[in-house]
Amino acid sequence: MKVLFIETTHSVVGGVGSRHARLAEALPQFGWNAVFALTKGARFHDPDAYLRNLPPIDVMTMDARTGTSEGRRFAVERAIRRVQPDVIIPGAVLDAWVVAERMKPRIVYELPGINLNTISYVTREAGNVDAAFGVSPLTVRVLRDFCGIPADRVFLVPTGVRKAARFPSHGGTLRLIYVGRFDPDKRVLDAIALAKELEARKLDFQLTMVGSGMYASELQEHVTVIPPTSQSALYDEIYPNADAILLFSPVEGLPNAVLEGMAHGLVPIVSDFEGRKELGLLREGETALVFPVGDMKAAADCIAQLPRPDIGNAARHLIENERGVERMTSEFVMVLQKAMEGPLRRSAIANTPLEGRSRLRRLVGPRMAERIRRMLGRSFAHADASEWPLIDNVEPPDRAEQEARLRAVIEDSIA
């Protein structure tokens, strides 16, 4: 049995790719093999850069350097025909959804976090999803109660991480790290305010941010920034040389890097993000120190408590006992098996038009037009990562109504 992961490479850091790589390593013992189809564009989607931070995986590229919608869809189609997967996980790649709906693989959707654009798109596609899973109780509730996927096809697959081999020794300068994307939804600019607050208190600290994203240049002016690095480097060099791992997000599914830090005995110092309490892992004063979202004085109060080996040890034991890779993989396989049961789920398929006006397309048809562009080396230049559009960026037409619905689902989960 084969599962095809469609992965976007516009960002070379993030928990989704590393989680999928860990699944790929463990799946063969459960009778499944994983193949990764990676987006490739002229400027913003680079499979080689993406793979530098992952262990070896079975990979093919979806080359759409012509920058056209037909080029992207033909690339996805070629990947599916070549791999012949039993299950496809289209992820956030918009054109993968368009193509998969017209081909035979069962569709499994994974919700790693809460993004209104994303879940609104999945709501429209719910009739085409054969099974779905969330990484936390909140994301499971959103798939079921917001997106409308039947409850018997929605599952919980919490992230599992590898055990640590090296653990930090504490004392002296407080070593704080953040690992992840430097994008607005992560509130990473709070790190600047936090650094200033710690300096005002004359605490001896070092704050290191590992990752990349929109705010990288702003962060570099105030804290130490390290480019995205491989998981082996994180495990060998970054986590063992830290005391605490930070998270600033207002809402999260299951923060992958925080789990890895916990596996090393680091103290999680995290925002009280929506979904934290329901998650049950980051318990204030037991396995984490928690501050209100955006309150850097409270975050500094948490840091001032360090070292807290009692919390670090409790966090490590929790991850070792409950968040191993094998458990994650076995639960993921249950989702794949559920997707294979019963008739294929396909609702009325929308006719998603090709983008732009192309005289060549009108003259010779989309497939021949794409071949001619490739032969002539012609391409449409995109100004950003939309050379491979993501469902994360598809704005719902009724945004205010959708926001109210999402708020009701989240508040119901909190209650």
Image (cartoon, grey):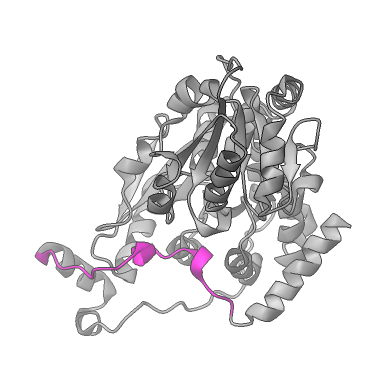
- In the image shown, does 101 or 240 lie closer to the viewer? 240
Q: In the figure, 120 relative to 340: above or below?
A: below
Q: In the figure, 409 relative to 166: above or below?
A: below
In the displayed structure image, the side of residue 360 where residue 392 appears, left or right: right
> Can you give x and y, in whole percent of width and height, for residue 195 in the image?
54, 43
| Residue sticking out furthest to the right | 415
Q: Residue at x 64, y 62 (%)?
A: 345
Q: Is residue 334 visible?
A: no
- In the image shown, does 340 or 187 lie closer to the viewer? 187
Q: Residue at x 41, y 79 (%)?
A: 353
Q: In the figure, 323 relative to 355: above or below?
A: above
> Can you give x and y, in whole percent of width and height, for residue 183 in the image?
49, 55
Q: Main secondary structure of the magenta part?
A: loop
Residue 375, quarter of picture: bottom left
Q: Residue at x 78, y 61 (%)?
A: 410
Whether residue 4 is in magenta: the answer is no
> Can you give x and y, in whole percent of width and height, for residue 248 in the image?
62, 48
Q: Which residues are magenta?
A: 376-396
